Image (cartoon, helix red, strand yellow):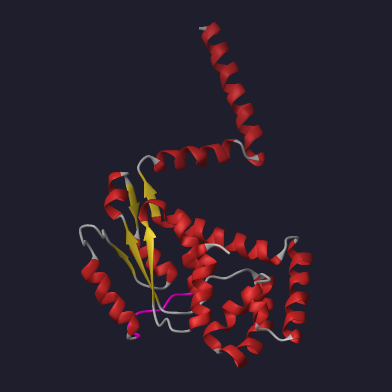
Amino acid sequence: GSLDEVVTRDYLLSRDAQLIVNVLDATNLERNLYLTVQLLEMRVPLVVALNMMDVARRRGIRIDAEELARRLGCPVIPVVAVTKEGLTELQARILAAADGRESAGTPLGHGDCVEEAVTALAPRLSAHDGDGNARWLALKLLESDPTAEASASPGLLALAAQWRGQIADRIGEDADLHIADTRFGHAHALADRVVRERGRAGRTLSDRIDRVVLSRALGIPLFLLAIGLVIFCSLAFVGG
């Protein structure tokens, strides 16, 4: 599997981790947030370190760390590892999270159909693997993860297969692809909400104007109005 999958699988196998420090590249936040979304599903205390903030600032990238922390439900600390900027605060927040004095992170949803499947699978996993891993393992079974399937009973495998079929029928997409798409969607939405780049505001305004002018409801009336104004101005010019 990918490095993301190996990291999370190793955690499930070892059960030794009490805290995860998730180091993100501030210059490429959206791609990095995909793993963060997965780590939140594992319900292990999480602290996010936004590294390379100096490079991000030089590139005109601003990140609202407070807003990102609010949406993830865990501490988010901007740092510059090479100059040790922010490392003292990061260390303090890590200790606070390890002691339970910080919020541990909030798992993001996967839509009604997948959540129904997780609700059906998780209680049977809790009895064997504990509440902390139940949601994560339920998602892994829905994704047909070999490691999760190897430790599941035949009845649980059958139930997971049944739910995968329901998800495919109701959503029109295989469960593993749908779950991955949802994670990418969360990563994109988070980055879109907290990242501001130099010159992005102008493009956003242009995009909003395009959406109005090119919409079905207003596009044709605005086009006719523009033509009318051209004709009116032409006649006024000729008449003058």
Task: Find out whether residue 219 is within the magenta segment.
Answer: no
Main SS of residues in magenta? loop
**Residue 88 appears in which quarter of the rendering?**
bottom left
Q: Residue at x 29, y 75 (%)?
A: 93
Q: Nearer the viewer, residue 232 or 138?
A: 138
Give x and y (percent) for residue 100. Answer: 35, 85
**Residue 154 appears in which quarter of the rendering?**
bottom right
Q: Nearer the viewer, residue 216 or 191?
A: 191
Give x and y (percent) for residue 22. Answer: 39, 68
**Residue 205 appears in which quarter of the rendering?**
top left
Q: Residue at x 61, y 69 (%)?
A: 110
Q: Which residues are magenta?
A: 100-107
As drawn, is 19 to the left or to the right of 206? Answer: left
Give above or below for 237 relative to 198: above
As drawn, is 84 to the left or to the right of 116? Answer: left
Q: Nearer the viewer, residue 52 or 103?
A: 52
Task: Find out whether residue 101 is within the magenta segment.
Answer: yes
